[in-house]
Image (cartoon, coloured by chain):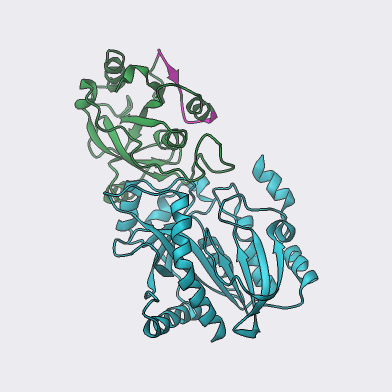
Amino acid sequence: MVTQQWKSQAKTAGQAVGVIKAVTNKVPDAAVVLGSGVAALHDLLHPVVLPFEEIFGIAPTVAGHAGSVTVGQLPEKPSVTVAVIRGRYHVYEGHDYNTLTLATKTIVGWGVPRLFLTNAAGGVNAQFDVGDLMVITGFRDFLNPKYRETGLLEAAMAPAVASDNALTASIIKAGQHLAAQDKKFRPLRTGTYCAVSGPSYETLAEIEMARRLKVDAVGMSTVPELQAAAGTGTVAAALSVITNVWSDDKPMGGHEEVLEASKHASRRLDQLFRYLLQN
Amino acid sequence: MNLAKAKIFDFTGASDNGSNFKEYDASVAEALRQSVENKLAIVLDYGWGFKNKAPHLVLDHLNLSGSNPLRGPNNPIGERFPVVNGIYVTDCDLLALQDLKTGVVAGLKQGQKASASELDFLYSMGAGFYSYNLVPTMLVAAHAGWRVLGVVGPDDAQSTTGSADWRKKVLQGISSN
C-alpha cells in the first residue's frame, strides 16, 4: 500500500528539525507556507534550500507544489530570517494526519514564533472576486482522515471553529494599512474556510450546502496545520487566495485555472508578507 | 441518448441481466475504467430518509461519507482534480423515468443510519434522502469521463407495497428504450 510505504519513509518532526539544523543554525523569525501556485518571497538573501524529501523523507506529488524549504534573510531587512515552505502534503494524495501536520510540527519544534499559512481556495461567498486574499478567521474541518471511519455528518452539523489570534489581527491591520497607502492593493477579505478532502472539486449542491453553512471559501488543506500549531509556542494564521468564485451559471475551472489565478494574487501577497515581516 | 447501451451498476441486488453489486467496491471502479464506446452509467441504489418515500432521479449529490474513492495516487485515466458538475443525467425523456420524483442525494458512510435530527439537517442542506453507493460510483465515473443516470429508491422494507418494484420498472423501461 502506498500510504504504508510513505509511513515507512517519513521522518518524525524531531528528525526533520535535526536535518535542518545540520545545514543552518538560524531559527527563523517567521515561516511562510505557500500553497498551490502561490508565489512570494522569492529573493531571500543567502538562501539555504532543502527539498521536502531530504527533510521529511517524502516528496509531494502535485503540480504547483515544489516541495522545498528555503531559509534566508529578508532583503528589505536582513536582520529578519524567514523560512519559506513551498508545498505541503494533502489527504487526497493518500497521506495520514501525521504527515499532513509534519511540516507544522517541524516549524514548532524548530522554535519559529510565527507561522503564516497560505492556500488556493474556491470562493463560495458570492461577494468575493477572483484574486481576492481572504484572512481565515474561522474554519470547518471536513478533511480529517478520521472521518473515513465516522462519516461527515457530525462535523457538518458542528459550528465553525474560530481562528482569530494576535497574528490574524496583525494581518488584517497590515492589509488595512497597505490598502490605504496603495490603491492597487485590494482590501483583504475575512471569512470562514472549509477544508475538504478532495481531490474532486465540489458539486453545485455541495457549494450550496457550504453557503448555507456560512462558509466563504473551500480548499483542500491548511486546517490540520492550524490545529497542529494551536496551543504551541508557534502562533499560526492563514490566508486564502481566491482562485475562482462558484456561480450556478458559470462552468467550474480546473487546477490550471487555480494556478493562473494564484499567480495574479501572489504579487499582493508578497507585498503583504514583506510588510508584516518588517514590522 | 441510447440508454440500452449504458452500463448498469445495480446496487439493489435485483438485476439479473447485468452487473449486480451489493455495495461499492474496487470492482466498480475497475468496471468504470474500462474502455467502452458509450460512457454512460445507470446506477440503481437503495436510499433511506426520504422526504417523499418514492424512487428519485438524482439531480446532484452531497458527499458526507468522509471518503473519496479518488484519494491516493491519481489514476491516469482522468485529471488529478476532476470537475464533477454536470455529470448526472437529468434530461432523459424515457417514460419509465418521467414518473420519478427528482432530488439531491446525500452520500453517507456505508451503513450509517441518520437520526431524526441528522435527517432534518440533511433536508436543510438541500438533500431529500441518502444512500451509500451512488456517490462513490459517480465520483469514479466522472473521473473516468462518464456521465451517470442515478436512480435511488426505497428498499422492500420501506416500500408501502412490500416490494421495491421501482427497480423492475426502471430496468424494463431502459431495456425497451
- Residue drawn at x 30%, y 18% is B174
Instruction: Identify whether A262 is placed above or below B92.
Output: below
Q: What range is drawn magenta here?
A: B16-26
Residue B82 x %, y %: 45, 43
Instruction: Identify whether A72 is placed above or below B53.
Output: below
Colour chain B appears in: green
Residue B18 sits inside the magenta stretch: yes
- Main SS of the magenta part reads loop
Looking at the rendered structure, the number of numbered marks drawn on it comes to: 0
Residue A216 x %, y %: 36, 62
Question: Horizontally, is A139 left or right of A25 in the view?
Answer: left
Question: Horizontally, is A14 left or right of B54 in the view?
Answer: right
Residue B49: quarter of image:
top left
* In the image, farthest residue toward the right: A22
Residue A117 sits inside the magenta stretch: no
- Residue drawn at x 46%, y 37% is B143
- Residue drawn at x 65%, y 45% is A3
**In this view of the protein, can residue A195 be seen by the observer?**
no
* Quadrant of the rendering where the C terminus of chain B is positioned: top left
Question: Horizontally, is A243 left or right of B93 in the view?
Answer: right
- Residue drawn at x 47%, y 35% is B140
Residue A83 x %, y %: 64, 72
Instruction: Identify whether B10 is placed above or below B73.
Output: above
* Quadrant of the rendering where the N terminus of chain B is positioned: top left
Residue A226 x %, y %: 53, 67
- Which chain is rendered cyan in the image? A
Name the residue nearer the viewer: A106 or A66. A66
Instruction: Identify whether B32 is placed above or below B143.
Output: above
**In this view of the protein, can residue A178 be seen by the observer?**
yes
